[in-house]
Amino acid sequence: MERDKRTISIRLNNKEQEYKEQEYKEQEYKEHEYDLHEEEQEYKSQDRVFNEAKEEITAARDERYERYDEELEDAPIPKPDNVIDFTERHTEREKGKGPFWDDGNRESGPKLPVNRKKKSQRSFTFSLPSLPNFSSLKSFSLIPIAIILSAIIVGISFGVVVLNVFTGGGENAAVSEPVQQASSEAAPTFQAIDGGLPTLSVEVIQGGAFSTVEKGQEMVSVFQNSGLAAVLTDTTDPLYLFVGLGADRGDTTSLAAILENEGKETYLKSYQVSGEGLAAASENAAAWYTDALSIFNSMLTLTTNSLAKGSGISDADIQAVTKELTVLHEGREEALAEIPEAAQASTLLLGTELDSSLGHLAGFMNSNDQKELWKAQQSLLRVLLAYEQVVEFY
């Protein structure tokens, strides 16, 4: 017999039961509904347990608070005798510090605060002093005027002495002056002296003074990188930075104005290298240095006139200096033979820098480039330092 298509056959324990599809679905829905009911009952049970625990905790907390309140109510209140009044004790202690006024000690006497001191009741009357009567010489004393004049004279004399002490007042003295105090008086470039080497006097432009070589060389590089002249002395303390020189103060003033337009701060200074009194110097050596410084003076005039006054350099000027240098180099070997060995290197450097300065002057004549003139100044500054080393080695 063919089964109904809507019939479901289930075998359980070898027993086969047939259910219609509608009955099976109803049975399945009832079982699912039962499961949901069981889960709901379980959730309600958990909520009930949670609420009971919460109520127990709340009841325990309330009971603890009530017990604390009862303990506080039953606690005895401290008696007034047990309260310590610190204000009263502090007042008594301060009273004990008071001085005994009859002990003769007035150092701890009572004083009013600074802002509450009593104002003095005394009054002062100011009146102008009466002028002396000059109608009679007998009433006028000359003693105060004499004292004042004596003090002025003594002060000026002392100032002159101090000035001579600090400026050296003698050989190799270097005096600094601001550019504004420059004068146009000429200074001798060199002077031949019997019994020693010639003395070289120039006007230099100082750009600074330094305690260490490293700091000074940094500023030397700044000037030279700008196309200007700069050398650092090595026989002075402190070390001076020279950035130009001339035969007189008028030329150096004009050169300093050019440097100030370049943003450089400068000072004018008279600088002297004295060879007087050097007994070890021979006549041939002194004559050679005199000729060398004469050429130095000629080239210094050419550079300063071209920089400060705008004068040109002619071919005749170059030829004249070249002829003098040729004669100087011809007598160099004879002079070196009579020069101390320690001074020979500086002497050779002096001649080399003279040649270098002449080359830059010729370069300016051909190109009209003022940088060549500053390079000539650079070489002449080195001649100055080389001659200073020569004098130091004698």
Image: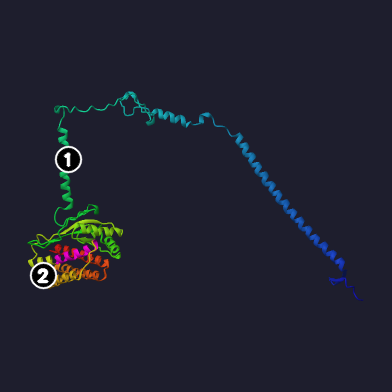
Report the residue at 15% width, 62% height from top.
Answer: 392
Q: Amino acid at mark 1?
A: Ile
Q: Is residue 204 visible?
A: no
- Check disc 2 and report the residue beneath it: 335
Displayed quadrant of residue 271: bottom left
Using the image as rendered, state which of residue 290 and residue 65 is in the foreground.
Answer: 290
- The quarter in which the N terminus is drawn is bottom right
Q: Secondary structure at mark 1?
A: helix
Nearest to the eye among marks 2 and 1: give it. Answer: 1
Magenta span has 299? yes
Report the residue at 87% width, 66% height from top.
Answer: 23
Using the image as rendered, state which of residue 90 and residue 57 is in the foreground.
Answer: 90
Residue 390 percent location from the top left of the image:
15, 64
Residue 121 percent location from the top left of the image:
34, 24
In the image, residue 121 sits, relative to residue 364, either above or below, namely above
Report the residue at 15% width, 67% height from top.
Answer: 295
Magenta span has 363? no
Q: On the picture, is 50 further left or further right than 71?
A: right
Mark 2 vs mark 1, CA separation in Å:
55 Å
Q: Residues within 10 Å of mark 1 (few under 14, many from 20)?
A: few
In the image, residue 296 sits, relative to residue 55, either above or below, namely below
Tell me, for residue 152, which label it has, or none: 1
> Which residues make up the magenta segment?
292-308
